[in-house]
Image (spheres, rainbow, N blue to C red):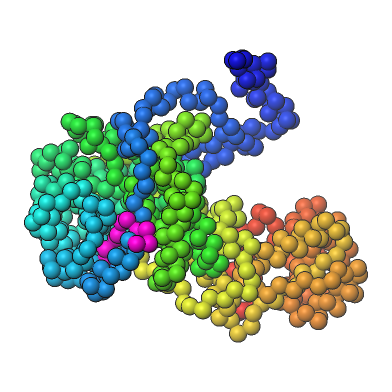
Amino acid sequence: MNDKKLFSDFEETTTKSWEAIIHKDLKGADYSKKLITQSFENIPIKPYYRIENNDTLSYLNSNPNEFPFLRGNISKPRSHKIRQNILVTNYIDTNSKAIKLISSGVTSFGINLSQKNNFSLSDLSSLIKDIDLSRIQINFICGKNYLQITKVVKDFLSSTVFHNIDFSIDFDPLGHYSISNFLPTNYKDDLKSLFNQSKQINGFKVINVNTSIFRNAGSSAVQELAYGLSIANDYLSIANDFNFNIDAFASKIMFTFGIGSNYFFEISKLRAVRVLWSKILEAYGIKDFNSAKMNICSVTSDWNKTAYDPYVNVLRTTTEAMSAIIGGTDSLLVNPFNSSYEEPNEFSERIARNIQIILNEEAYFDKFIDPSGGSFYIENITNSIIENVWDLFLKVQKEGTYHSAFDKGIITSDIQETASKRDMAIAMKTEILLGTNQYAATNEILDFTLPIRNNAENTLKLYRGAEAFEKLRKKTENAKKRPVVLLLIFGNLTMRKARASFASNFFACAGFKIIENDVVTSADEAIKQVKLSNADITVLCSSDDEYLSFSSELYKSIRDETIITIAGYPKKHIEALHNVGIENFIHVKSNILETLINFQNTILK
């Protein structure tokens, strides 16, 4: 057998040689501006990574199920828990629905009891009747009733011997405070009570640090992790003050992370946070490294979901689910595609559930452990996230606690700054929301009223990135007359087609009616088209050099009948076009949202 190595006849390509070719091809252009991109996490992303980029990453020597758990908490492949939330109105009906869902593949429930008072042992028995608690995870969404529900659950679990139970309570007062401005004065005593009730019951978690609130306020992944870990650290500090066993207390905490659409960053995020949590618990002096295993529930983000073209949300949640599973989540809630603007129905819940089932059963996502391990790109992004999160975490600690940092406005202002950048990216189309700021379906009409958010003062502002565009389109729909845009096409074939397509996409984002007629060859034909169309906006679509030949005569004839707009920004002719009287230009550097709002206000005034 020939054991000669493959490609041994070829010289190894070094990083230096790669860089030499790149600099040659750039012809003097700035390498960092052309090829280095900056994420919202302020992490520079290189155009390529090589094996030497991994040489300094010491944690790469760890295996799955080894401290600091970068590569996950398990040593053998297993399925994550497939979660679905249920709002409880009737206990018996909820139980019937749960039994049906279990037969459909659900292995974890979020039981929403926030609207229920006087929860009893009998109610709990009705809820979980005939459910195999050794196989099904139960997560209680409690609202203000967390103490009462915890006591009922504790009494139930103490009355019988259960094996491998997996229960949780969503107690997270600091997280709730961040979005409601309400914090129980005795929340530290409540935490003590919850721990004492649960400490003898393995598998019963009573704290759920929900960082998805940061994600749905427009934060970066780094901010989400840093502030979530800061909240958890406050809870650890309280436990320390009460002289709790830190190993035991850590086992009572789970985390819920929001998963966005930045595919590789979201994979890296879950890997990074396990390392950071391990290091924090190590600093608290845990005795058993297994106590540092982080229990993670992931939930698909609301921030990037849209009311228009809502089935695109199915694709978004699919990639988010993939990131969460590859990143090593323990359980996963895929929100139904319509959950951000209306109550989900049986169909949308089934689609959400089946995304996970397909990933497991047909894509074999339950047959591996940490498949991204060793990837030059993902490992370096993971390391960058670890370093940046740790820096931000330490900044919070300098303020004393998360609570004090939040009260000073440090948390909200930091996240608002990132959210504003993301809003601007959507407005400038450097971040795409398909169906919203790109390739919008012009004839789509919403037959419902968009929900109004009531964010409390001095708290995180929860919203979706598409909301400003949706408000714009809804105003168009509610108008007595729908604005009409005529694409006036002439001249160079390549340029007129490209600019007509651009202009159509541009104005479709406001729900305006788009008219594209035959190519015109003279100003007289153009004037005739404009008058027949009764267009509110007329967009000239041609090459830069051909705009001047039409603009002067056109402007004089139709300036009082329509808003003349140029598709593109012909720099060398701008002054001449201004002299003609044309002031409106749409191009790739336009703030599309601001521009469309101005057009809309002018037409619908």
Is residue 492 visible to the viewer in this orientation of the structure? yes
Which residue does the image show at 27% across and 52% down from the upper left? 135
Which residue does the image show at 48% across and 25% down from the upper left? 54
Which residue does the image show at 22% across and 63% down from the upper left? 130
Q: Position of residue 485 (x, y in %)?
A: 72, 73
Q: Where is residue 273 in the image (x, y as percent from the top left)?
A: 35, 40
Which residue does the image show at 27% across and 38% down from the upper left? 293
Reply above or below: 16 against 163.
Answer: above
Work out whether residue 59 or residue 418 is closer to the camera in this orientation and state it. 59
Q: Where is residue 584 in the image (x, y as percent from the top left)?
A: 71, 64
Q: Where is residue 336 in the image (x, y as percent from the top left)?
A: 43, 64
State the quadrant of the C terminus: bottom right
Quarter occupied by residue 282: top left
Quarter occupied by residue 532: bottom right
| Relative to 305, 601 lies left or right | right
Is residue 468 visible to the viewer in this orientation of the structure? no
Residue range corresponding to the magenta coloring: 103-112
| Relative to 536, 330 lies left or right | left
Work out whether residue 318 or residue 6 is closer to the camera in this orientation and state it. 6
